[in-house]
Amino acid sequence: MPKRRYVSPAVIRRLPRYHRFLGRLIENGVERISSKELSSMMNLTASQIRQDFNCFGEFGQQGYGYETKRLHNEIGEIMGLDRGFTAVLIGAGNLGKAFAKHIDFNAAGFTLEAVFDNSPEQIGMQISGLVIRDVSALEEFCSSRKIDTGILCLPGEAAAAMVTRMMSCGIKSFWNFTHEDISLISPDIIVENVHLTDGLMVLCYQLNDALKG
Amino acid sequence: MPKRRYVSPAVIRRLPRYHRFLGRLIENGVERISSKELSSMMNLTASQIRQDFNCFGEFGQQGYGYETKRLHNEIGEIMGLDRGFTAVLIGAGNLGKAFAKHIDFNAAGFTLEAVFDNSPEQIGMQISGLVIRDVSALEEFCSSRKIDTGILCLPGEAAAAMVTRMMSCGIKSFWNFTHEDISLISPDIIVENVHLTDGLMVLCYQLNDALKG
């Protein structure tokens, strides 16, 4: 299948959602779905969905809809979920521990290879089958393996120095749970920021808006 | 200031980010900023920013830029951050505990009023100054207070029944960390879904894309 080079960030951000919805359809035994049906499920327009899928090639057949399994696989492939990327998590506080236990890394294309912390109370503890390692051993750990991504669950004030250190270990991409803007540290850095409270603020807006009637 | 009625979801989703960036500018002593400067900081176009702010009224003056404090306050007001909304959190597992401790509810316009769980091991424990309550006391708790939002950190299979129960307590909006689609439960429900792994998948896409050169 021919793939176009430029895909807009908005389309890229919709891919995980398509993947999720298609996965559910497959679980429910749905083999084929029209862009119209998918659009009403996903609260998008049918033409939006057709446009999105057209960015990557020809997935459906006019009048026959999309094969759910094929489309699910293709979207997974486009995202590179089968590439076996690797991640390490820095900061085994409440949030880091919760993420290490709760997040389905494999489903998102990653293996969580290690968890690091600098607190003697945490180092040596087990989490999701991984021993929490001393962050002073980060360089040694990375020297023998290719690590693609750093998951930053450490205090914000320590983030910039840690990112610089991790980049010198060859780690180029970061899933950033701190509120620090690390994107300017290097032109080569790939950053996905998570601002949990943004979602809560959107909820606040909607409640406020509903009050106005 | 006159406010237009319809604001697109895309604009609403950018409001928390504007609020965050403006807050940082104020912290750094910046009193005034042009849409051009703000655009390069935020990786948006200047015309996008002007259009967004125009949805709500007239914030800036041609050639003089925006007053950071005033704009920050106005956006906060538009989102209703000063309305004093209330939330309860259901599910004091790893994730629920981490969120109760880590999230700045006040900054997002909420007070976390209570945490509920059904596990005898959790009930009675303290978290962020709140005692974890028995979820069987939810109705009683809500009968004496107005609770606006439910934060769902419970197992997905229990989500739908819990939402129905919470709605009969007068709770209409939900911050949903489960993977269940609860939006169809009622036409009146307000839902903000959090799919953490979506962000990780976007990172996967970007790593995969970078590999292709």
Image: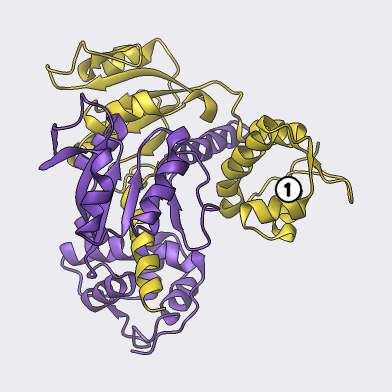
Chain colours: A yellow, B purple
Direction from residue B91 to residue A75 in the image, left or right: right
Residue at the image point whose x is 71% and y is 50% from the top: A38
Position in image of residue B84 (x %, y %): 21, 66
Determine which residue is flagged by label 1.
Answer: A53
Q: Which residue is found at the position 16% from the left and 62% from the top?
A: B27
Residue B80 drawn at (x, y percent): 29, 70
Q: Report crowding for label 1: few under 14, some 14 to 19, many 20 or more residues within 10 A (C-alpha).
A: some
- The image shows residue B162, relative to residue B50, as above or below, that is above
Circle 1 SS class? helix
Relative to the observer, which residue lies in front, A133 or A70?
A70
To which quarter of the image does residue A125 belong? top left
Q: Position of residue B172 (x, y in %)?
A: 39, 59
**Image: A9 above or below A125:** below
Q: Nearer the viewer, residue B208 or A184?
A: B208
Report which quarter residue B17 is drawn in: bottom left
- The spot of residue A62 in percent (x, y) is 89, 50
Q: Residue at x 38, y 50 (%)?
A: B175
Q: Identity of the amino acid at label 1?
A: Phe
